[in-house]
Image: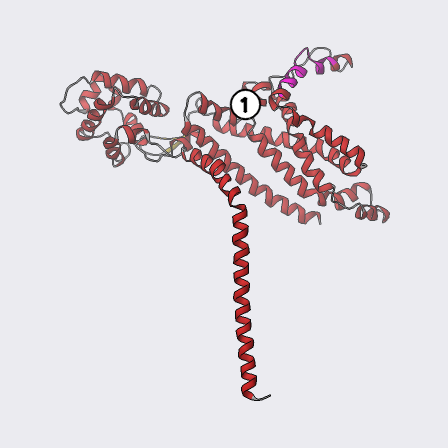
């Protein structure tokens, strides 16, 4: 073959290789577009029905639009005011003018409600001041406000207005962790008689952790039995596991109230067996919450464990036993590490569901057994304080994600140690 022919042959090979790579990239790009087109409706559904509503709700935890919308010039002037300083007569005059203009509108009620969250009694102060200002067109002064109510001469009053001057605020997030801003802008702990949310979060995560452990202890042998018995018996047992899903949570929780009451079936059985002499309190307390929540969430632990155990081969276990390993050692070294993915998935699922429980603790628990979801519902439905409800939800989400990260790392470390 001549030199020119060899060069020509190499050039053709180079051209063919380049064209082939380009065609391959086009094919991959086409496949990616087709895949995106297939999942686009699902992504759009998730965005419209989950991401946007939840995102807009959580955004309310940092939004503070009431004062900015109703008293816009006052809000701008207060934002530029140094923390802890009583405003001059010019800012006071603007505030009085806008207060006179809006006192007959419903928007002033929203401002009063927002300020009342910061200082109890601010709603009464604002409306009384608006009424007593009269119809005068002369500029208002700080002395005039102080004559109406001496609280207008206090730094805390104007600091509350400044904190609400928006458009964004840390007020709700700080309140959700029992913190607040002082007149000079420092963050301090809420007084003990008013601090409730830290204890509620501790209670929420504590009850959820106990319920998760109880579900794991009860579900592990059940899942093992389902995975190892014959298919006919296994299918029958699986129907029994799934049977509670055919009834609403409200009905199941109400049934537990009947079972656990002082003259209920559980106390009757215990007294008949002479385990107890007098009825014990099993409802409207922490014990009732544990029992009812464990019952409701138990299937969510059984199903992930069963899915993993069903795929585990019995041969390694038999081999370990035939080589002289004890049943406990075989379980610890061979079987348990293979079920850790199911344990992780089940615990995470049950824990996340437990921290959001509302109906069950509200019905079978006492006043000191309510979870954070009760307070979120309270602020959403009764006081209409959407900012506080969103802040509690955001803190719950942040703590849950943090615990999930820690739990994932601990699980990964444990998996390596079991090997």
- The spot of residue 243 in percent (x, y) is 69, 27
Q: Is residue 364 on the magenta stretch? A: no
Q: Describe the colour scheme in one phrase.
A: secondary structure
Rendered-image quadrant of the N terminus = bottom right
- 154 left or right, relative to 262: left
CA neighbours of label 1 inside 10 A, class few (<14), some (14 to 19), many (20+): many
Magenta highlight: main SS: helix
Residue that extends furthest to the left in the rendered view of this protein: 138
Viewer-proximal residue, 263 or 238? 238
The residue positioned 45% from the left and 37% from the top of the image is 52
Residue 359, quarter of the rendered image: top right
Q: Position of residue 276 (x, y in %)?
A: 73, 14
Start and end of the magenta stretch? 253-268
Q: In percent of the image, x 54 and y 65: which residue is there?
A: 23
Is 267 magenta? The answer is yes
**In-image side of 223 versus 230 (left or right):** left
Residue 177 seen from this side: no
User: Residue 123, percent across and down?
Assistant: 32, 20
Q: Is residue 345 visible?
A: yes
Residue at (56, 40) in percent of width and height? 404
Q: From the viewer's side, name the closer residue of 192 and 17.
A: 17
Left or right? Give the position of 150 relative to 346.
left
Residue 53 percent coordinates (x, y): 45, 34
Secondary structure state at the residue bearing disc 1 = loop
């Amino acid at each position: 073959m001549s030199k020119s022919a060899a060069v020509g042959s190499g050039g053709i090979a180079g051209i063919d290789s380049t064209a082939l790579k380009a065609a391959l990239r086009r094919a991959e790009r086409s496949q990616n577009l087709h895949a995106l087109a297939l999942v686009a409706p699902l992504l759009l559904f998730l965005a419209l029905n989950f991401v946007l509503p939840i995102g807009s709700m959580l955004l309310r935890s940092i939004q503070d639009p009431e004062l900015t919308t109703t008293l816009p010039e006052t809000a701008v002037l207060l934002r530029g005011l140094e923390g802890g300083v009583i405003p001059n007569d010019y800012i006071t005059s603007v505030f009085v003018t806008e207060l006179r203009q809006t006192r007959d509108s419903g928007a002033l009620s929203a401002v009063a409600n927002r300020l009342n969250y910061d200082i109890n009694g601010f709603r009464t102060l604002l409306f009384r001041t608006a009424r007593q200002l009269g119809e005068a067109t002369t500029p208002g002064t700080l002395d005039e406000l102080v004559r109406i109510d001496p609280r207008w001469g206090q730094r805390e009053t104007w600091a509350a207005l400044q904190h609400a001057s928006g458009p964004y605020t840390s007020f709700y997030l700080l309140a959700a962790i029992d913190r607040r801003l002082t007149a000079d802008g420092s963050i301090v702990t809420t007084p003990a008689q008013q601090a409730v949310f830290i204890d509620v979060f501790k209670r929420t995560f504590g009850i959820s952790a106990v319920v998760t452990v109880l579900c794991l202890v009860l579900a592990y042998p059940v899942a093992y039995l389902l995975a190892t018995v014959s298919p006919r018996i296994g299918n029958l047992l699986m129907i029994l596991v799934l049977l509670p899903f055919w009834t609403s949570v409200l009905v199941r929780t109400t049934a537990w109230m009947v079972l656990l009451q002082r003259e209920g079936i559980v106390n009757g059985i215990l007294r008949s067996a002479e385990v107890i002499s007098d009825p014990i309190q099993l409802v409207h307390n922490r014990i009732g919450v544990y029992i009812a929540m464990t019952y409701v969430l138990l299937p969510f632990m059984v199903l992930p464990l069963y899915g993993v155990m069903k795929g585990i081969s019995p041969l390694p276990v038999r081999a370990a036993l035939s080589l002289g390993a004890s049943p406990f050692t075989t379980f610890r070294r061979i079987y348990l590490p293979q079920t850790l993915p199911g344990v992780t998935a089940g615990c995470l699922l049950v824990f996340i569901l437990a921290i959001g429980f509302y109906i069950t603790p509200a019905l079978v628990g006492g006043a000191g057994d309510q979870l954070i979801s009760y307070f979120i519902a309270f602020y959403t439905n009764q006081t209409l304080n959407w900012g506080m409800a969103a802040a509690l939800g955001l803190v719950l989400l942040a703590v849950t994600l943090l615990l999930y990260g820690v739990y994932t790392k601990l699980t990964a470390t444990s998996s390596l140690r079991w090997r």
